[in-house]
Image (tube, grey):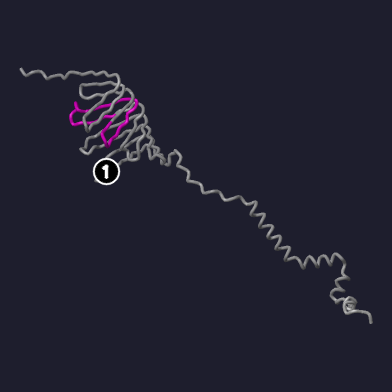
Amino acid sequence: MSDTLDDLAVLAPAPATDRRRLRLPWHLRLLEAATAYLPVLLMGALALGTWWLVNVSPAPEAERAPMPPRHEPDYTMQRFTVQRFAADGRLRVQIDGAELRHYPDTDTLEIDSPRIRAFGPDGQVTLASAIRALANGDGSEVQLFGSAQVVREAARPQDVLEFRSEFLHAFLSAERVRSHLPVWVRQGGAELRADGMEYDNLAHVVELKGRQRATFVPRVRPPAAP
């Protein structure tokens, strides 16, 4: 016999499964092959979808610094009265007005038609008023705008000290008043006018700036007894 073992292997009949597959139509054979590779195709599709999501997703933004507070009032009050007390419970400052606006970024109070009463350690009262005022949070420093007036009361009428100007800057705790605008000062029978002023009550000093003019009213002596 001239047939070799290899030739016999070639001539051996194909398995029944292979013979059945060969008899199937081509589209069914294609479907069967696709089904066999379906897990691989699904894994590939999942990997491709993950890659696409990574590329189209926006990059995370860098952490933003907190925005500074805007210069807007966080609360307002109409026809109000605000009182500040010292640590020992004594009334230190009382502020009345038509409207108050508090700005948290500067901790300041903007006041329309302010009326202010400040009480010194010795009980002496200082009154202040204006068309508008700007005060710090505790009311110890007040800027007065428009028809500004500061009056420091005293036991004797001749010792009452009064300041008037279109702008007055009052430091109520330090007992100082200043202005860079023309100012009018009166105490007793004396009236002073100047282009500016620095007043320190604790040092008992008034510094007048620029052009100055003073008027002194003589005291009227009581008639001598007959």
Which residue sits at x=66%, y=56%? 51
**In this figure, what is the number of numbered marks?**
1
Magenta span: 150-176
Residue 14 image point, x, y percent: 87, 76
Q: Is residue 76 visible?
A: no
- Image quadrant of residue 3? bottom right
Which residue sits at x=89%, y=75%? 10
- Image quadrant of residue 8? bottom right
In front here: 223 or 117?
117
Residue 115 image point, x, y percent: 32, 33
129 on left or right of 105: left
Q: Give the amino acid type for the residue marked by disc 1 in the picture.
A: Ala
In front here: 202 or 188?
202
Residue 127 lies in the magenta-colored region: no
Q: Secondary structure at mark 1?
A: loop
Q: Is residue 22 above or below residue 157?
A: below
Residue 175 lies in the magenta-colored region: yes
In front here: 121 or 117?
121
Residue at the front extreme of this rendering: 2
48 on left or right of 187: right
Residue at the bottom extreme of this rendering: 1
Mark 1 highlights which residue? Answer: 86
Q: Is residue 205 above or below residue 212?
A: below
91 on left or right of 166: left
Which residue sits at x=87%, y=69%? 24
